[in-house]
Image: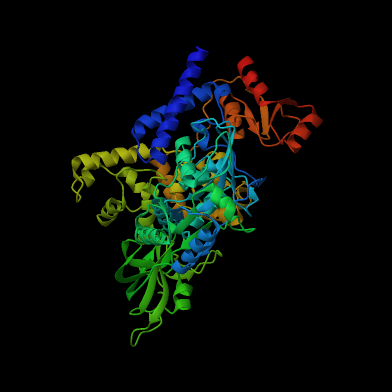
Amino acid sequence: MKEAITNRLGELKAQIERHNHNYYVLDNPIVDDYVYDNLMRELKQIEEEHPELLTSDSPTQRVGGEALNLFKKVERKVQMGSLQDVFSYDEVKAFTARCEENVTNPVYIIEPKVDGLSVSLEYADGEFIRGSTRGDGFIGEDVTANLKTIRAIPLKLSKPLPFIEVRGEVFMPKNSFAELTEQQELNGETPFKNPRNAAAGALRQKDPKKTAERKLDIFIFNIQQIEGEEILTHKQALDFLRGLGFKVIRDYVSAPDYNAIAERIEYIGEKRGEYPFEIDGAVVKIDSFAHREEMGATSKTPKWAVAYKFPPEEKETTLLDIEVNVGRTGAVTPVAIFAPVLLAGTSVSRAVLHNQDYISDKDIRIGDRIIVRKAGDIIPEVVSVVSHAEDSKPYNLPQNCPACGAEAVKDDTGEGAALRCVNALCPAQIKRNIIHFASKSAMNIDGLGEAVITMLLDNGLIKTAADLYSLKAEQIEDLERMGKKSAENLIHAIEASKEAPLDRVIFALGIRNIGQANAKLLCERYGSIESIKNAPADEIALIDGFGGVMSENVAKAFSDESFLNLVATLKERGVKMEYSAAEKSDNRFEGKTFVITGTLPSMKREQAKELVIKFGGKAAGSVSKKTDYVIAGEEAGGKLAKALELGVTVLSEGEFIKLIDTI
């Protein structure tokens, strides 16, 4: 029986990683999400029932574990150097001339320069053991847990080399960045300026689950160290890396001389807007490793490579109008409307102007000739004013909300110079709040997009999100582009959303600055919406991951009469307001208190905690005389010392697993 389970586990892991490779590396999925999800569900079930079979290379371990308090330093033997930037074709020509003076008949490789951040990945016997940031080249930070969330990174290589260290570029795809900034704007947050900043912030999140939400990707482009294989050229290295299971950028070519290099750089520049990821130039490298040795390096950069940086594409156009929008938190946001221009491969006619300070600093006026560009090739922005229109006047934002006429006041939270509408019943805020409430990451009501919500509001069928739960199919089937079947499907989706876990409900309610992860922390701490409502701000602030502003915003929301009415109505109409604890399979640990500390060999502390709870025990955060067991891993520290001082039984991970089997 055990052998059959072990074999099935191996089959599932192999299948899932093959599907991950097809989807995330080859961009060629061969099964639909339903099949994939069932395979993953079966794997999780086996690992939960047989925790001794859980290994660090399991696909289930890509996202999990506790948040990190700090990032350990990583010292490396091989420097992760930077490239010399060049900004003209003359500089590229000078580079090739230097190469040809030092080596005979050099061949070059040209590839797009992905605008991300460099990381090192280390593998021992084919298994991913550590990942780190570039840092100063010799010392970086250990971000292994966060890198594991990037599904293009193989946890196990196709060939079990004794050791290999590779270098890659982590980036956020353009579509993921667009989704992120849209959500940030919907939440009234300041969006990231470009995908690189967003990726850098995601990679240094203390909680890997937050990193996973950012949907990062990676290209591997270099071998830093290798044992068990001899590689002679860069092209050979790229082909070898692809064979191991790494995602390698495919759009690279060989070139014999400067003319071919210049032609390829020009081609990459023309195609710049068509790449699904941000690039900021082209990298030119000598192909032969022997030639690289002859060329040598300075203390900071190799002499055998340069990075040609593209200038930002800017266009001149006419500012036709400034539109003022109101977000779900009441933020009054000005948007420039200008004559369409082609930037980075797409037509652009709008750009956010952020706030009054931004407009005043650049002296932006309606009718101006302006320079626009895409920041990071993604987000349109107004760079500067070329000239003012005749008789133009400085532009000032309205002091009243354009949607409801209520007073718009200066933001007083220290988050920026935004104006905010103070009317909680503002129709623009209500609409944005309902859109957020129904969104995929909140209540996930399929079929309830902005257009349908607008129709429901315009026809007086809803006034708040709670009204969704009193809708009937016959009320909406005659609306434009609905019909009987669509109406029934929507009502079913609304009904199904009542089963959403409380953390999604909290996030859906749209409390300022409270994202998905913070909503979950609140639920884990308090367990019900009633307990959250009664929690004082200074107590909420003690939750790891919360700050003063967030805790004050939670307390403020639950003291607002309209917010409380919304919560009460949602509860009355069947939306869950209790947080479900982990399901218990039996009560073998009933009455026992465990503390988990240090780094366990094969499972995360959170997994050990879940096992304790699953079997009826209590997982505590600190050691006391009431503690029955301390499960200790490497670097256990003060909790282990306290346990030994008090005579508490200390278990290794293996002993903990045996305890599960013997009780």
- Residue pushed farthest right? 645
Q: Position of residue 580 (x, y in %)?
A: 50, 33
Task: Tell me what residue is drawn at x 35 percent, y 85 percent.
Answer: 392
Q: Position of residue 284 (x, y in %)?
A: 47, 56
Q: In the image, is residue 102 above or below residue 437?
A: below
Q: Is residue 654 left or right of residue 44?
A: right
Which quadrant of the view contains residue 89?
bottom left
| Scheme of colours in the image | rainbow
- Residue 151, can we see it? no
Residue sitting nearer the eye, 171 or 221: 221
Q: In the image, is residue 420 above or below residue 72?
A: below
Q: In the image, is residue 518 above or below residue 632?
A: below
- Residue pushed farthest bottom? 391
Q: Please give the count of numbered marks on the rendered protein.
A: 0
Q: Is residue 76 left or right of residue 201?
A: right
Residue sitting nearer the eye, 443 or 75: 75
Q: Position of residue 342 (x, y in %)?
A: 31, 66
- Residue pushed farthest front? 104
Residue sitting nearer the eye, 449 or 351: 351
Task: Tell me what residue is drawn at x 33 percent, y 46 percent.
Answer: 468
Assign the C terminus to one quadrant of the image.
Answer: top right
Q: In the image, is residue 436 above or below residue 364?
A: above
Q: Position of residue 18 (x, y in %)?
A: 42, 31
Task: Tell me what residue is drawn at x 28 percent, y 40 percent.
Answer: 491
Residue sitting nearer the eye, 481 or 11: 11
- Residue 274, can we see it? yes
